[in-house]
Image (tube, rainbow, N blue to C red):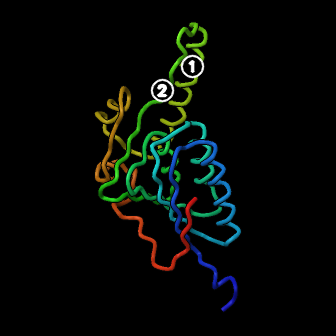
Amino acid sequence: MSEDQAKPKEGYFTLSGDVNSDMVHRVFEAVAGMNDDGLETAHILVQSNGGYVSDGLCLYNFLANAPVECIMYNGGAVASIAVILFLAGKQRYASETARFMIHKSHATASPGSRPDALNIIVEGLRADDARTESILRKTVELTPEQWGIHQYGDLHLNARDAKVAGMIDDIRDFAPPKGSYLRNI
């Protein structure tokens, strides 16, 4: 058997924590390693309650176009901007007990903020919402009622709701085979 045939063609990874610059760095490094190892497919279990919009969008764009095909799994909770990162998967799955939560962007202004500073915050939030909503609308099919909830609050989806909406392909657990290539990102 040649050296190339001995290398695993797929690997299993866990990715957890806040979506921030540290996660971006970890994912960049991990995908570079996957590529160097000759992996073709990365099964990635995501566990995150969200974080920074720009970091999540960066990860979405990077993973959707990575040299390794990403298959995403939700084994517990994927929320806020982590949903956008999750949607980068070419295939997506969730455990029966998993949940998703999406909502509009939010920020806290400093006490005593002037109107011009508040306008800048509002403009940034609207820009972030436009970027994330464009990905949601091209990827998932929410009902008008669900879009209405999303407009003004937190929209929670269980695995069955997520499947109906096309957020996941099926209800399936992340289950790396014994002896498989398994790493934490």
Residue under the image location 52 percent in, 44 percent down: 18
Residue 152: horizontal and vertical position, in percent? 36, 26
The residue furthest bottom is 1
Identify the mark nearer the N-term, 1 or 2.
Answer: 2
Q: Quadrant of the N terminus?
A: bottom right
* Spatial separation of the CA atoms under disc 1 and disc 2: 9 Å
Q: Choose between 64 and 46: the one closer to the eye.
A: 46
Residue hosting label 1 = 121
Residue at image point 37% right, 64% down? 173
Q: Give above or below for 81 relative to 177.
A: above
Q: Amino acid at mark 2?
A: His
In terms of secondary structure, where does tag 1 sit?
Answer: helix
Badge 2 is on which residue? 106
Q: Are marks 1 and 2 in contact (CB under 8 Å)?
A: no
Of the pair 44 and 88, the residue shown nearer to us: 44
Which residue is at the front of the view, 8 or 163? 8
Find numbered disc 2 in the image and state the secondary structure of the residue it sits on: loop
Crowd tier of the residue under label 1, counting other residues whose Cα lies within 10 Å: few below 14, some 14–19, many 20 or above = some
Viewer-proximal residue among 11 and 128? 11
- Could you tell whether 19 is left or right of 92 in the image? right
| Residue at the image point whose x is 60% and y is 17% from the top | 120
Q: Position of residue 163 (x, y in %)?
A: 33, 53
Q: Horizontal and vertical percent for residue 178?
A: 46, 79
Q: Is residue 14 left or right of residue 2?
A: left
* Percent position of residue 123, x then y: 57, 20
In the image, taking residue 163 as reference, residue 90 lies left or right, namely right
The quadrant the C terminus occupies is bottom right
Q: Residue at x 53, y 19 (%)?
A: 122
Q: Residues within 10 Å of mark 2 (few under 14, many from 20)?
A: few
Q: Tell me the kind of residue under disc 1.
A: Ile
Write down the quadrant of residue 92 in the picture.
Answer: bottom left
